């Protein structure tokens, strides 16, 4: 049996190296924290060292990505749990893993590692596993389904949900979508408009303030024609009230706005002026689940200026993992109203549901 060691800044990176080098059937034989002296002796840095082998007859396989279909995952879960349990017992005997997850029942280490695989930041993964450990009785941590349920409850408690757009037939509700460029604002406006008209019998109208790109108005006009909806264009904040009134007797006004780079504060201020003129009842900040945690955080911070009160998460179908989304939801302190799961208008949209979102984040459920 040939042994290899891998070092990385985090457990997740080290596991990724193992998988890249030795494949998914590699087995982990040990982990420990090591200190590496920096160049010229300037302090030191902590690294995670993982010892692994490609010999499948050794103890425990590296966990597969949680992006695999949930059915297969469920089947693997119980088996993986007991195999990893054996590994952890072995590691614990030598005191090599305790420092990574102090005071944690060894049965929950595989859960921790699966959360990292689902792209959750380490701090958040530790917190969730700790929550689960505190919640379950010692005999319950042996039962995979109880661990899964407790984990799901933990994530659900971190996921605020908003009700769908509160349109009422006969009264005019004004709803604006804002967000970074290319996240799916226009497509989502079209999906919402089509669903409110076709499924719920409302009379929606569309307003666009996106007059910067020549194609932008045409994109929305095409949807308006297909769905048979009135469309108005506002070129400046002063034209906003006129544009809304021009739609006539509608009960839902959906305002599509130009994508703004979170770095462009001037353009975000301009957007805020448009919204101040529109006096919307709801402002939804549209965020793509494919964006990095850092970009999501930047978007939430910069768009605070336009006072978005809800979030729409788009492109869930394209995201590798939703761990970054979860940590940003904590920071954003705004509930999620809708999820979008593909390019098809009007089908690929659903009102946000707490359990569904938690299960998607944990990789317990597939998007489609
Ligand atoms: N896979 C996937 N693609 C999506 C989804 N929503 C939108 N898209 C695609 O994302 C691309 C950009 O969509 P738009 O609706 O034009 O995005 P936007 O935010 O209006 O873009 P700007 O107005 O340029 O800022 C298009 O190709 C859409 O089909 C989704 O839920 N999943
Ligand atoms: Mg657009």
Image (cartoon, rainbow, N blue to C red):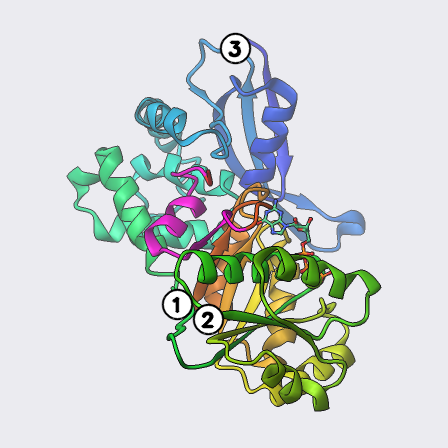
Q: Is mark 1 within 8 Å of ligand 1?
A: no
Specify few, some or many for label 1: CA neighbours under 10 Å numbering under 14, 14-19, or 20 or more: some
Q: Earlier in the sequence, mark 1 or mark 3?
A: 3
- Region of the chain picked out in magenta, as a range: 346-366
Q: Is mark 2 within 8 Å of ligand 1?
A: no
Q: Earlier in the sequence, mark 2 or mark 1?
A: 1
Q: Position of residue 101 (x, y in %)?
A: 40, 45
Is 251 above or below relative to 133?
Answer: below
Q: Nearest to the eye among marks 1 and 3: give it.
A: 1
Mark 2 → mark 3, Cα distance in angstroms? 48 Å
As drawn, the label of residue 334 is: 2
Q: Secondary structure at mark 1?
A: loop
Q: Quadrant of residue 215?
A: bottom right
Assign the N terminus to one quadrant of the image: top right
Residue under pointer 3: 55
Q: Residue visible at 33% across and 60% down?
A: 157
Judge whether residue 121 can be spotted in this image: no
Residue under pointer 1: 162
Mark 2 → mark 1, Cα distance in angstroms? 8 Å
Tell me if residue 350 is in the magenta stretch. Answer: yes
């Amino acid at each position: 049996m040939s042994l290899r060691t891998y070092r990385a800044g985090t457990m997740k990176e080290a596991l990724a190296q193992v998988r890249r080098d030795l494949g998914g059937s590699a087995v982990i034989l040990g982990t420990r924290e090591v200190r590496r002296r920096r160049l010229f002796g300037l302090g030191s840095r902590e690294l995670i060292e993982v010892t692994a082998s490609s010999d499948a007859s050794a103890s425990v396989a590296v966990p597969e990505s949680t992006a695999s279909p949930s059915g297969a995952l469920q089947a693997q879960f119980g088996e993986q749990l007991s195999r990893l349990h054996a590994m952890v017992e072995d590691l614990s005997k030598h005191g090599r893993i305790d420092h990574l997850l102090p005071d944690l029942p060894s049965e929950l280490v595989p859960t921790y590692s699966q959360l990292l695989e689902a792209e959750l930041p380490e701090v958040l993964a530790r917190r969730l596993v700790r929550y689960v450990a505190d919640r379950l009785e010692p005999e319950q941590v042996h039962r995979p389904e109880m661990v899964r349920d407790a984990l799901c409850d933990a994530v659900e408690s971190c996921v605020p949900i908003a009700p769908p757009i509160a349109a009422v037939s006969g009264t005019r509700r004004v709803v604006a979508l804002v967000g970074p460029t290319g996240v799916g604002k226009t497509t989502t406006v079209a999906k919402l408009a089509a669903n409110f008209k076709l499924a719920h019998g409302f009379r929606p109208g569309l307003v666009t303030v996106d007059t910067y790109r020549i194609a932008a108005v045409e994109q929305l006009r095409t949807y308006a024609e297909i769905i048979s909806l009135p469309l108005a264009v506002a070129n400046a904040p002063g034209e906003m009230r006129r544009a809304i009134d021009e739609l006539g007797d509608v009960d839902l006004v959906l305002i599509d706005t130009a994508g703004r780079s979170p770095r462009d504060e001037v353009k975000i201020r301009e957007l805020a002026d448009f919204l101040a003129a529109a006096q919307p009842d709801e402002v939804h900040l549209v965020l793509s689940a494919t964006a990095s945690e850092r970009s999501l955080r930047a978007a939430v911070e910069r768009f605070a200026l336009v006072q978005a009160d809800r979030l729409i998460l788009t492109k869930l179908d394209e995201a590798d993992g939703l761990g970054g989304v979860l940590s940003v939801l904590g920071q954003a302190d705004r509930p999620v109203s809708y999820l979008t799961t593909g390019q098809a208008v009007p089908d690929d949209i659903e009102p946000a549901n707490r359990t569904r979102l938690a299960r998607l984040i944990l990789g317990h459920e597939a998007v489609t």
